[in-house]
Amino acid sequence: MLGLMNASVFESFAIWGVLLIALLGLGYALFLRKQVLSHDKGTQGMQDVWNAIRTGADAYLSRQLKSILPLILVLTAVLFFSVYVIPPTDEALKRFSNFTPDMVRLIVGLGRAAAFVMGAFFSLTVGQFGMRMAVEGNVRVASASRRSFAEALKIAYRTGTITGMLTDGLGLLGGTAIFIIFGIASPDVLLGFGFGGTLLALFMRVGGGIYTKAADVGADLVGKVEKNIPEDDPRNAAVIADLVGDNVGDCAGMAADIFESYEVTIVSGLILGLALVSITGELKWIVFPLLVRGIGVLSSIIGTYLVKGSSKAGKGEDAFKSINRGFYSSAAISIGAFLILAHYYMHEWRAFFSVAIGIVLAIVIDEVTKYFTHTHHAPVKEIAGSSRTGAATLILRGLSIGLESSAWQFIVIALTIMAAVLIYWGQPVVFILYGVAMTGIGMLTLTGNNVAMDSFGPIADNANGIGEMAHLEPEARQIMADLDAVGNTTKAITKGVAIGSAVIAAVSLFGAFLTDVTKVQAQMGIADSLRLLTTGIRVSEPIVFVGVLIGAAVPCLFSSLMINSVARAAALIVEEVRKQFHIPGLMEGKVKPDYKKAVDICTISAQKELIGLALIAVLSPLLIGMVLRVEALGGFLAGVIVSGQLLAVFMATAGGAWDNAKKTIEDGLYGGKGSESHKASVVGDTVGDPLKDTSGPALNPMIKVINMVSLLAAPIIIHYRITNPGVIISIVLCVVVIFGAILYSKHGALSFKKKGETGF
Amino acid sequence: MLGLMNASVFESFAIWGVLLIALLGLGYALFLRKQVLSHDKGTQGMQDVWNAIRTGADAYLSRQLKSILPLILVLTAVLFFSVYVIPPTDEALKRFSNFTPDMVRLIVGLGRAAAFVMGAFFSLTVGQFGMRMAVEGNVRVASASRRSFAEALKIAYRTGTITGMLTDGLGLLGGTAIFIIFGIASPDVLLGFGFGGTLLALFMRVGGGIYTKAADVGADLVGKVEKNIPEDDPRNAAVIADLVGDNVGDCAGMAADIFESYEVTIVSGLILGLALVSITGELKWIVFPLLVRGIGVLSSIIGTYLVKGSSKAGKGEDAFKSINRGFYSSAAISIGAFLILAHYYMHEWRAFFSVAIGIVLAIVIDEVTKYFTHTHHAPVKEIAGSSRTGAATLILRGLSIGLESSAWQFIVIALTIMAAVLIYWGQPVVFILYGVAMTGIGMLTLTGNNVAMDSFGPIADNANGIGEMAHLEPEARQIMADLDAVGNTTKAITKGVAIGSAVIAAVSLFGAFLTDVTKVQAQMGIADSLRLLTTGIRVSEPIVFVGVLIGAAVPCLFSSLMINSVARAAALIVEEVRKQFHIPGLMEGKVKPDYKKAVDICTISAQKELIGLALIAVLSPLLIGMVLRVEALGGFLAGVIVSGQLLAVFMATAGGAWDNAKKTIEDGLYGGKGSESHKASVVGDTVGDPLKDTSGPALNPMIKVINMVSLLAAPIIIHYRITNPGVIISIVLCVVVIFGAILYSKHGALSFKKKGETGF
């Protein structure tokens, strides 16, 4: 079976077993959905607010689908025809030895295109279905909080778990299915799957990030700052857009992002595993990561089901304890099962240690993130303290803390790779790269729990917003406020894991890039001494260093454009909200504002900004690869990873720390709300918002998209020289489109002419 | 002669000629000094202010000397004894073949230690003498401005030229002298010279940066923001410290920084040139860079002497035109001479093109810097526009613009290296690296003019301050204000060149690192296939990637600590100034504040913060080299360069753009001074100040110090394995000292206990 001759009976069963576990995970998600939907939706007032949110969310989702669809279709065709540019691999010919080479080419082309569509569709499903469920859940949480804390907590967490299990289940299902069908020929097809997922995640992250912060910043600038009315005040025209935005950004964006890391680590794990299979002749190197993932899904099912409030009138701490209990139960079950796997199946411990280090890494990153952004620790206290000398010193402290955390996160990632080096000491490089991929697999073992914790955030936040707008009883409001606070913390923790896993995933993709290029070079008969894995990507080679420098430029440019996009979209919201405040009777609460208009502006802006940014991410590695060749492309990837990680952590940390510094001041420190300190901290929070929720998070999928494109394009780049007319035309096209995209993203041409007037 | 058998008569004369030109440059500096000192110092009131500045400057300089001296002594001994750890090179034995190996060891050891002292002393001289001259000049400019614009301009520019010619002359003198004495053995000794210069520059930059911004931010926060009194108001206790700070930062710091780039490009140029000599057997590869430098000195002498105001009552534009005329005259003379050199001496054009690209690069970087930070262009206008929606949006715009400029500067540097690749297409890597070094040489050809333009800034600024404090006539004040504005522009332009040249210098040091390590490996009989220049530094090797990541962490940590240091020192100033405002009669102008106290606080703070930061820069490459070995050390250097360049440009641009956005608003845009827009822009300026004048500029010497240390330590690292007890002890020591330094820098232990209270 599998085109792999030496699969043992256990192995054959195990792989099918993993497929069943993936389906089980999806079944569990459907079961939870039924459970959640069976709860009531509360009063008419609550349902009115909820309906507005739901309509806004639906509008965003359907318009997003519409604007993405053409690109998906074009890329599906590109991926299908790409097999006609270069011949199918020897592995593919071997796997499908019953067919003629032409037929094999067709099979691989169809497989790759189908896998791309599947990856894109799964990513979209995780984001969209998860977000729809979050919207269904929030009103039910609000209603349940009128009865009991325990019930509200349970509904909120289980709704989040639906997204979590979708992420797990679909990621595992796709990877395993491709592996079962294509066996040793699967790398080629897996790349399509990975690319589909990363590209959609990029869309969800970029679109979601712009939407959520345009609405948030826009609503705050006019509501809180100019008009001095509270958050979630129904008189603010952007308040529904803001609530929708929480779902769009934290739920859809984050879930798609983690799904993609989950998927990409499987892709690179299988590619590197297959390389080890061909070296050692042992199948275990690919079965192992699949089994690890299967164990993760099972233990997430058990762990997440354990989460429920203990008492009718609980507190935030109870919720936090219960969520943590679920997490650590899952972790314990996983580690136990990994031990059994290492002893009885692998007959060795190295792979186990790599995976275990992944779990340790997730915990360490959590702790580092917490240290720099949590109200209990020195950094946030220092930022809050610096508010007494005004906004400038507060901003400076935050920048300094963001940079410091970047430094430490670099060192944490470096130590992780170092661990893989030590574990596979003396083995060929491929083993070490495999070790890094396994660390990525390990890190995302508990994806079900992680995404559940993350989605919990916007669900609790929205429930709280509904409670506010529908004027619920104080007891219910207190319960929702407690849940909201818990959600803010769990959400922040997941952010660290998302960045960390993105970098580890990117590094293992980088590893896959090396082995893949080497394989292609071998098949082309390129001399051993010139193959990439032997010669390596030499940063000491000036042309490679050029690649590194250009690679480092991309995340800078990307972040800069993202910040501008948010500013531009927020300016439009500011204008709209200001205009609506002039509607007679609105300030007295007699007339309702037109929420839909603000929702529309956010939706359209987010979609418009998408295209330019996506083109830059997709085309820049192609351009570098074609002009500077494959070695420099490797340098380019290294540059992207380094500068992307630097900026992602810097922005996430500074933003999170400013946010929490503001919260501690609002809790009464240095004069509390309305004081000069508070005003300074609001400036910090407003600066931090687009950094931590838009440009920072968008760097995760960007890094991975660039790596995936490089992996896909590498064989073509190796095949054709720069003197080929097709290559020359492609280079010219790339340059034109990239510069066009930069100009478009920078000036946001269309319909944004008023930017000067609104001050952005 | 020179231990080089094949030197032609022309070449022998040429090298001695370069030495004479270096001395001529120094003579010109002394001649200008005499000229400047012959002018009068104005009224008693002016001299009082001037005396306060001079005393403050002297206090800083002598205390700095005292705190640096022990470290210099220790390092001199370390460098001397380093030759006893590893044997002298074959080249040294060949150069001094008349002596016994033991004697040669002694000669090289003494030479290296002496060169280190010379490098340090020269760097110190450029900084200290230049700064003393700036102080002598400012009062004379103030006095001359009462008579004529032309005279004031001439004195200010010529005072700046003294520092410029010192930078040129001393850099060339040291490099040429070492080359004449040590010939083919000079690389070893040159490293000592380079290290001395870079280390001192780091001290001057870090100390100067902290001093100037602590004084500036401290003075502004209490004076402008809290008390609403104008800049340079004599009632502000920190006003003298602020004026001293301008000299300490922009004059001493910048001059030492550029001196160091000037020196380091000679060092790497000669090392790489010697590698080419041994390949081609032609001496021209090392004579060429020396001749280029010599031409640069001569053309700077002519060009700078041409600068003088044309009329008695000129305007800022006249000054700018005149300074530019000088610059372009020098450039034209240089390029003409290079052409002659290429045709009649080199008999080929490649080296000429490399050098010419350096000049082009300097101009392009100028233009990019101007685009992003000048009031005439879109970025600054956008930042100013965003002030209308408050400080938060203004900060966001600035961050976005800073990131964008980082992206473009990366691409400019990448294209420069690409040009070297194309010029030496098909040649071994060493040629390309030599090309990059020549680009660095070319870029700094007009160092005399550049430093003159930079020093002009603080001189005009101080003259203006003296005018303000001594209540001079309105006409004179207008002249000084015009000169001050010109100085701000010329200063900003030099900043771009300083960063760009630092990166190019670092890249050519990186190239020197490669060839040097390969040479050591060859002498140790390490197989050809394992030598660094053959195998390269493979970023695809996980351990090298670990090095890259840790390298990228260092500039983040360094910047973060620098920002904190400034904040801490500024907090002390704020406290002091606030206290002094309570002195009875001070606000009415009846009693003078105690300026000396603020000066003391700045001086002491700056010195205290130095040590920790310097230790991190010096020890981190040693630690990485010892633990991860020489390949990973190469990766580390690449990481440092990439992340250092990213942050340096980001900080310089964002800071400069905020500064100018504030200026455009003060000139009347969006409500002018006192408006809400203006308040927002003051926040931006205050955030930007420590970024553009402290942490950003300090990254230039930091990058180069790390490269120099790696070059020096590489042979020792190759010689001894990690199992060696001495290495193990060194590793432990490094870890302990580095963590100690981080903690010390972070918490600034001693005497800074009050930080919580002052709000920083």
Image (cartoon, coloured by chain):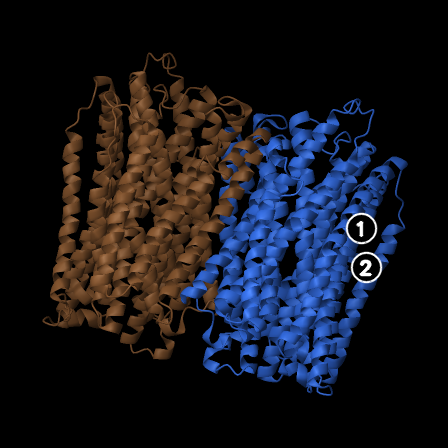
Chain colours: A brown, B blue
N-term mark: 1 or 2: 2
Identified at 20% across, 62% down, the residue is A344
Looking at the rendered image, the disc whose residue lies closer to the viewer, 1 or 2, is: 1
Q: Decide which of B694, A477 is in the foreground and name it.
A: A477
Disc 1: host chain: B
Q: Decide which of B428, A494 is in the foreground and name it.
A: A494
Name, please, the residue furthest toward the left: A98
* A416 sits to left or right of A454: right
Residue A517: assigned label: none
Q: Look at mark 2 in the image and give the residue it sits on.
A: B29
* Mark 1 surroundings within 10 Å by alpha-carbon count, few (fewer than 14), some (14 through 19), many (20 or more): many
Residue A531 image offset from top left, x and y in percent: 35, 74
Identified at 29% across, 63% down, the residue is A349
The reply to whether dot 1 and dot 2 touch (C-beta < 8 Å) is no
Identified at 43% across, 57% down, the residue is A415
Residue A381 image offset from top left, x and y in percent: 51, 34
Identified at 36% across, 30% down, the residue is A485
Q: Quadrant of residue B161?
A: bottom right
Q: Is label 2 in a helix, a strand or a loop?
A: helix
Residue B132: assigned label: 1
Residue A4 image offset from top left, x and y in percent: 16, 69
Residue type pointed to by label 1:
Arg
